Amino acid sequence: MTGSLKLVIMSDLHIVPQGEVSNTLDTAARLQAAVDSVNTHHADADLCILAGDLADLGEAAAYTRLRDIIAPLVIESHLMLGNHDDRPVFLDVFGQAHADENGHVQKVIDIKGHRIVLLDSTEPGVVEGVICQTRQDWLQARLDEARDRPVIVIVHHHVLPLAMPVDSIILRDGAGLVDVLRSHPDIRQVIAGHVHITTTGIWHGVPFTTLAGGHYNVSVNLPGHATPQERLEGPGQYAVVLADHDSCVVHFESFLDRHPVIAADNFGRMRADRRL
Ligand SMILES: [Fe+2]
């Protein structure tokens, strides 16, 4: 199947100011590799969505660096926030027009028979994801407007519990969000970053996917696992979504394929309120 709609989704870029690294990783170089990969292999895509954790610690210098690195992208890009981001600093650098009337960095994109919903799950001072009543109402209205067409939702935090340690910073009240999503007859995918691992699942009939993103990956760590969870240098990954009137496929493209374990003592600089 060749989808008529093609989306590239990057997540968890964790850009730092010039001269710094994040947990030993040169995240700017990794994003540069991702941009080069997209321009080489997916220049025909309709959009590139950057699904949050754009900056590692939310500094202005990281956002300006991000802006410079993605400037050569040959496809249109749309920015979202994650728990590592700082909304006011982001808006200062990229412009207040990125916020909606309630201050959330979210919007819909109607393209090729689909509605793409970019949903802001960040809440200042909160590590977990939050979809407050205002955002639930906004989402409900955007879904009601598009009952005649398929919808793909992009949100930074994972909604479906994965039975992994990262569930301690999952989206709060995911079941409430699922109730809203189920009101629409044709949710094709709900795609998140945040967890730094690739997963797919279904909850009350709604399909959920996470991508590993551009930063470190975590190893699978399910209840009963004999070894602690490890953080790996790779792969650096983005998702490619192909969708048409009756199907939706999510591919995962590795632009960097390294898997060494990063020693745990390289994670001390993380702020307590911005884990992962
Ligand atoms: Fe992240």
Image (spheres, rainbow, N blue to C red):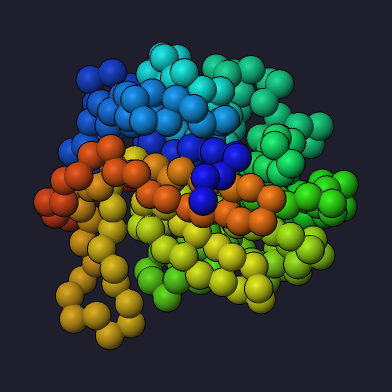
Residue 135 location, x and y as percent? 76, 49
Residue 227 location, x and y as percent? 17, 75
Residue 157 location, x and y as percent? 53, 54
Q: Does residue 220 appear to the left or right of 243 in the view shown?
A: left
Q: Does residue 88 appear to the left or right of 41 in the view shown?
A: right
Task: Indicate the quadrant where residue 90 lies.
Answer: top right
Q: Does residue 156 appear to the left or right of 184 in the view shown?
A: left
Q: Which is more toward the observer, 255 or 97?
A: 255
Q: Does residue 117 appear to the left or right of 154 in the view shown?
A: right
Reply above or below: 92 against 273: above
Task: Indicate the quadrant where residue 128 lies.
Answer: bottom right
Camera sees residue 103: no
Reply above or below: 221 against 262: below
Residue under the image location 51 percent in, 22 percent down: 75
Reply above or below: 143 against 21: below
Residue under the image location 75 percent in, 67 percent down: 182
Residue 19 location, x and y as percent? 23, 20
The outermost residue toward the bottom is 224
Q: Which is more toward the observer, 157 or 149?
A: 149
Residue under the image location 64 percent in, 67 percent down: 206
